[in-house]
Amino acid sequence: MTQSDATLADLLGSRICHDLISPIGAISNGVELLEMAGQSGTNGSAEIMLISESVAHANARIRYFRLAFGTATRGQGISNSEIQNILKDYSAASRVQIDWRIGADPDRCDAKLAFLLLQCLETAMPFGGTISITEDASGWKISGRAEKMKINPELWEVISNPSADFPLKPSEVQFALAPQAAGQAGRVLTLEVGEDVGIVVQF
């Protein structure tokens, strides 16, 4: 049996996230037990709080990565409330604010694509900014603006031209995966990038 590179990447993402969820959950449960046992008193409160915050942040990122890098099938849904909870926890430790304005429960393939594109936009906002996600009759629109933006034209060309010969860093893998996810979802990406408009991706 053969698998496409895109499918293998999705399976790998799902496997890694699945295997990490359990130990992170166990650490979270252990912190709760310590708090219940009175270990979060004057001497230990700072340490317990630090561990608790770190676990919460790790859990939020794993939940985000599970949707962005995991498997998704057209016709498979995901609740809007779950997405909003994931984004709320994910952005809690970020300088970038995410404004999710999708009204109905989206198709999981569309949500996966949106999450990958969100990470692409984040790379252009190292000092913070706002990303909004909307949908109307013409499709989805993901736009990002910030006072200071760091836009690499060669990197963004990978979105509109997946065959572009640009060496990606591990932190930029979403730029290669987003076009693949768009193809799997039956979507076509259109991109507008500039200092005057910020970054706007539609599909």
Image (tube, rainbow, N blue to C red):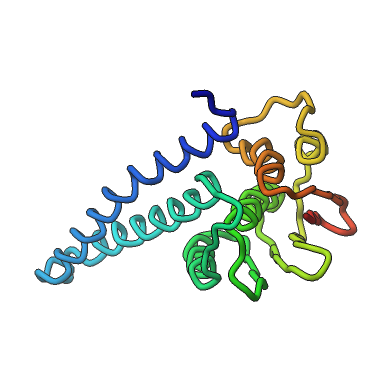
- Look at 47% across and 65% down and name the residue there: 89
Is residue 42 shown left or right of residue 199?
left
- Please name the residue shown 51% across and 73% down the image: 81
Tell which of 95 and 77 is nearer to you.
77
Q: Which residue lies furthest to the bottom in this view?
A: 103
Residue 182 position within the rendered picture, expressed as x and y whole percent measured from the top left? 70, 46
Residue 141 vertical placement versus 171 (above, below): below
Residue 173, position as x, y percentages in the image? 61, 36
Residue 38 % position (x, y) = 11, 71
In percent of the image, x 76 and y 40: which residue is there? 159
Residue at the image point whose x is 52% and y is 32% from the top: 8
Residue furthest to the right in view is 196
Quarter location, residue 181: top right
- Label tally: 0
* Of 143 and 153, the residue lying toward us: 143
Is 101 rendered above or below residue 58? below
Name the residue nearer the viewer: 196 or 188. 188
Which of the pair 188/172 is nearer the observer? Answer: 188
Please indicate whether residue 163 sits to the left or right of residue 181 in the image: right
Let me know if residue 146 appears in the view: no
Quadrant into which the C terminus falls: bottom right
Give the vertical position of 177 relative to 96 (above or below): above
Asked if residue 195 shows in the view, the reply is yes
Task: Determine the residue located farthest toward the front in the rendered image.
Answer: 1
Give the quadrant of residue 199. bottom right
Q: In this view, does 112 lie to the left or right of 33?
A: right
